[in-house]
Amino acid sequence: MNFEFSQEQILLQEEIRRQISGACPLERVMKVMDGDTTERLKIWREFAELGYQATAMPEDLGGYGLGYLELCLLAQELGRHVVPIPMISSIYLASEALLLHGSEAQKEKYLPLIVSGERVASLAWSEPGRRVANGNIATRFADGMLSGEKLPVADADIADLFVVLAQSEGQSRFCLVDGSDSTLATEHLAVIDEAWPHARLQMSGTPAELLPVNEVDVDEVFYRAAVLVAFEQIGGAQACLRSAIDYAQERVVFGRSIASFQAIKHKLADVYAATELALSHAYYASWALQQNDKSLRRAAAGARIAATRAYELASAELIQVHGGMGYTWESHCHLFYKRSRMLALALDSEPTWQRRLVEQLCMQKEEAA
Amino acid sequence: MNFEFSQEQILLQEEIRRQISGACPLERVMKVMDGDTTERLKIWREFAELGYQATAMPEDLGGYGLGYLELCLLAQELGRHVVPIPMISSIYLASEALLLHGSEAQKEKYLPLIVSGERVASLAWSEPGRRVANGNIATRFADGMLSGEKLPVADADIADLFVVLAQSEGQSRFCLVDGSDSTLATEHLAVIDEAWPHARLQMSGTPAELLPVNEVDVDEVFYRAAVLVAFEQIGGAQACLRSAIDYAQERVVFGRSIASFQAIKHKLADVYAATELALSHAYYASWALQQNDKSLRRAAAGARIAATRAYELASAELIQVHGGMGYTWESHCHLFYKRSRMLALALDSEPTWQRRLVEQLCMQKEEAA
Amino acid sequence: MDFNDSPEEAEFRRQVRAWLAENTSEFSAYDYDTMSDEEEVALCRRWVARKAEAGYAAMRLPRAFGGMDATPMQCVIYAQEEARYKLPFNYFGITLGMAVPTLLTFASEEYKAALLPRVLSGEHIWCQLFSEPSAGSDLANLRTRAEKEGEEWVINGQKVWTTGAHLADYGILVARSNPELPKHKGLTYFFLDMKSPGVEVRPITQIDGGAEFNEVYFSDVRIPDSQRLGEVCEGWKVAMTTLMFERQAAGEQSLGLIDFEDLFRTVLGIDLTDGPAIEDSQVREKLVDWYLIQEGLKYFGYRQLTALSAGRPPGPEASLGKLLEARGAQAAAGFATDLMGYEGIIKDPALAPCGGAHQSAVLQAPGIRIAGGTDEILRNTLAEKVLGLPPEARNDKALPFNQIM
Amino acid sequence: MDFNDSPEEAEFRRQVRAWLAENTSEFSAYDYDTMSDEEEVALCRRWVARKAEAGYAAMRLPRAFGGMDATPMQCVIYAQEEARYKLPFNYFGITLGMAVPTLLTFASEEYKAALLPRVLSGEHIWCQLFSEPSAGSDLANLRTRAEKEGEEWVINGQKVWTTGAHLADYGILVARSNPELPKHKGLTYFFLDMKSPGVEVRPITQIDGGAEFNEVYFSDVRIPDSQRLGEVCEGWKVAMTTLMFERQAAGEQSLGLIDFEDLFRTVLGIDLTDGPAIEDSQVREKLVDWYLIQEGLKYFGYRQLTALSAGRPPGPEASLGKLLEARGAQAAAGFATDLMGYEGIIKDPALAPCGGAHQSAVLQAPGIRIAGGTDEILRNTLAEKVLGLPPEARNDKALPFNQIM
């Protein structure tokens, strides 16, 4: 029994933490939130030089071929620093979809360019009115072309490659679309987190190539991404807890540090408990992802929900502990609070994951019987 | 606008509180909990002499003909003292069913005897496996006879008259059964609250008389009883809050009264807020009951849920504030805690009432449209 | 129990309705959603002036000062009736609800005569300069200095969270005049012209992008001693009076932080995997949670109004309203956006259900849990002032302010 | 990350399995549900003796005292394997987990030689006499007096919540030997023969009808000074050592307060109005809540075990387990009975789903939220010992005990 990351992995994580603290401190995230439209692509390219996008990518596709455990630890650090780059869109989702479903030629054509930071990809799956969640996809692929509307699509402002979930001959399939195609219309959307742009994507007769049919269904990519996003969420929650503790120690009211009031102490104890519980689920899920264990979907759903709850609690209480100051734009608190809500919704929201988790538990029970 | 009980009503309530404190202190409830099987009927008869059962009963049926507002205030005091008498079974449910659905002859025959304390009635509605909640009643009335099983039935140990929910020619109907009939088999059940006995009731060819068909459906009686039970629950919650405050003021740990710790103060503030919210709903529901207002069902469901939540919270935290002592049989805490869970289940549980409340809200919206 | 007006109340309501019917049309015709703040302020000034003509602007004031000596119940009736119309947002809330009654109680007759009419004409807006970076929950911890020089006071320091300071002509101010006294004892209360030299107002942007609040900096700002309200070093007492006026004004209206109707409409418009959201038991549970808070606080408000109309002052138990609503609003906003799935992130009013109200609520809820008393302070208030539990252990009350850590 | 045993662990597990396979059959054949407590205690004594023969009864003890110098990981492996069998309930938990290691650390060689063998033979059961009516969360507040008379100590006072005192042959005891010292400084630690004159044991009935605990009264009970453990007035330090042993023993097993399987089975057996309960989203949400706690604490336990097997001692962060489980268990029990509707009140094992486990849980949950540290104390521990937040303001630590209010 060894339920811990290895010494090498922990050292790697600490090195990443130092790098990101230096390269992308919260002030830089604030610039993005303040509307700087060029900063995200810059960070994306800087991080490509540090090799982050290459972490788990096989070596023959331009990656380092480290495992998913290392990618999880990277995700935790990205979350801790609310880094505003399209890691979820490009790496956890679009690249994973290509790795899972793409042909060899497709993988070789696109993945090395994503890894090197030259291209930014995004997975366009959601449609208006929760259609996709309700099991029908209106976007259609036929005769080499896509037509339909995707909303919201993350990072569409800087993405030049879209992996689009569509229906083709009654089947759910992924298709590849070049971001520069003239039949593609993107429209910026106002969203909760100004540091994570999203858009509406409209396709009409847009040239596209299908990814081949695969033995796993299209949902697989969401379960896999959920594990990585859970680490981002937990990294964020841990940063909130740390910041809340530091502020509480410092802030004096009624002649006492507010950290000495049970109302604050017990609140932070609850945040700690929620975060550690989530981290425990996420540890297991990272193992299941790395091993491709048959419990992966159950583990991923558990980690997803626990991490979502932890980050929501931690980021809300971060503001609460900071009081009025925490509610100002200049404070860093809202970076976490907004990102938390966005991440809670970005892979579809908790009720969907509750249904998924219970389905997995029922399947597991049936298999045992 | 006058959203308050009248001065006379408040004086009446205070008088009742004094009477019950004297006649049925917690020590007497404890005797019942310890297994004294004769005490409940004694209290029932003593209270009949005080006229409690007569409160809202019309004068021509042996009552005082006061209103439901007065009955609500009585219920609050009964709840405050966890009085272990079949008030819910006999008055809020069985008598209400007779008043709503009974023929004049049936009312005149039975109600004066219930009011005078000579008879104890109970409404037998639940059946095994949530059948009734699922909309089908297995107990059948045909040819003047009832056959079926009811479980659990409150106060069956002392009841000598049962109002039984049954199916007759495809309709839900109430029937009257004499408790002494030899075809009736009652079997004591172990339940959560030892001070509130329940039984299984089996009928096979038991002679019964139907109550006439009525313009309101059989559910009406549950909505009406819910208002009265809400006042019992709130009285209980208020007693818990009072007792918790008193104990916290007295108990010293780490050199301070535990009432000075925010963990305790904030807990009790939350109990207070829940109780006042429930009381506000209950006030409105008592008005709707008294006026037979068209909002009665919505108001009753709201009061039911809010009061259930308040009592559950207040009684659980009562034990928590008392610490180890609160977990002993000798402490009074468990009288409230057990009664709270029983009352939360006795008119069916919260999910059912949530469904009912939302149905009422939807109906109200449709009517407004 | 009786939900009807008394005959006097009914008569008053009839008068109010008639007056509103005649006077609102030109104000409610505007599209407030697209109007600039400046336009809305201008309209608001005109609306206050119009109300003042009929005595409705500051109803509780004596008739001599443009009020109508109204009872609390009459204020409520007016508020209920006015709420039926869409009217300019109330930029005069602090002016009329806090500054004016404080002036009326503590200012000289000369100042009252000079200043109150200019409020009622819609000309002057006032702000309240209380909170500071180190004085929020612990208001008495304020550090802004007031030093006497001859017949003037010299003010230095910083205030924060000052609603409408950028619009205000005058402000009410509490500052520390003697740091050698214990923290509650060394404060003095003033009012000042916001155009005085040395006053600088900077807007605060909130996390939702709004900017209703300001920081206000004082550098050697001079206030004549005649603008002192109350005695020297009795500022805490005066400030408590102002806050009591605020509580009275707040008692007359609900917070309205959770709009149950918005939630209900949103739910009715959503289809989940298994069917309409309204048939989903988890959705029903959350709807019930919010209904219980909103409807319960409405009834709780009726109970408080009954007390108010019987002449009892609004008590600290009203704290439970904001406590329940603010926590409930945050949970409600989270769940409402959850129900929309990934689309829940979109706050564009044209695309999001109910014009993005739930996304706005996500961003505003954290502020609501803080402003006007944090959850924690409200629970303290309920525990200490209502339930009679002992106050926090503290060692700062008796010490001279300049010796506190 | 690796869930497999190391080669050494695998080998040890193999040995344990083989031994259990050979030795459990005569113990697991009984029907424990119908057995009397006396019969179960007798069986438990025999089972301890059997385990002791193979070194499994007190694995961490040195071989010289009947243990096997086991590592924490070996203890866990044994516990995991033993849990696969239905065996007599452990009446020796306190004896082996707290009393024996304390004796081993602090008792004289003569006493160790005389007493430890009688524990390992299943003959002696020990109890722990710590808590008092005024000393629960604040253990150092205890008032039981120990007064020195010659070579003896005279004990007067009362203990409470003493598990198994009615069965115990010996007890470990903390008492106040000097009330003029501050509360933590005036305590001394002893062990005593529970059959000493003046010891009276009275059972405490809990709200669920169980009676596992006792009050113990001391009237002039005499203890020889040789039965003192640790120095005079250093009892607090010894008691903390005992509690550390307890925490170590607890770290090796999960609390198991919420049985997710029971809940899942119950849900699968219930039909609601709209269909099977498992398809109801509200039910799914609650199932998820409990799954996250139970499964998450399992993984959290793995993390702690990894630390344990790397030689790091169990830390205060383990408090989160009981905090989450106890609160979760109370909510779970409430909802599980809610799901049964009115029938949820029935606790008869023959009628209620899962043998009435959820009704028992309703009645036991309040005790779990208190015993071994209340929710509030656990949060204090997490906040102070893990997060490093400052302790509560208190004024009782430095004062002589007899001058505290």
Image (cartoon, coloured by chain):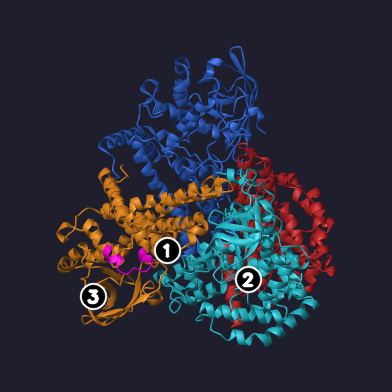
Chain colours: A orange, B red, C cyan, D blue
Quadrant holding the C terminus of chain A? bottom left
**Residue A239 shown in magenta:** no
Residue furthest front as drawn:
C150
Quadrant holding the N terminus of chain A? top left
**Residue D351, x across and y down, in percent:** 55, 53
Question: At 66% across and 66% down in the image, what residue appears?
Answer: C98
User: The residue marked by circle 1 belongs to what chain?
Assistant: A
Q: Secondary structure at mark 2?
A: helix
Q: Which residues are magenta?
A: A31-42
Viewer-closest of D310 and D236 = D236
Inspect the image, locate mark 2, and give the three-letter code of the amino acid beneath it.
Gly
Inspect the image, locate mark 3, and give the three-letter code of the amino acid beneath it.
Val
**Relative to B177, is C130 on the left or the right?**
left
Establish whether labels 2 and 3 are both on one chain. Answer: no
Q: State which mark lies toward you, 2 or 1.
A: 2
Q: Is the Cβ of the residue at disc 2 closer than 8 Å to that at disc 1?
A: no
**Residue C332, x across and y down, in percent:** 52, 66
Q: Secondary structure at mark 3?
A: strand
Residue C175 placement: quadrant: bottom right
Q: Is the Cβ of the residue at disc 1 closer than 8 Å to that at disc 3?
A: no
Question: At 41% across and 54% down in the image, what residue appears?
Answer: A237
Query: CA gap, disc 2 to disc 3?
Result: 55 Å
**Residue A39 shown in magenta:** yes
Q: State which mark lies toward you, 2 or 3.
A: 2
Q: Which residue is mark 2?
A: C93
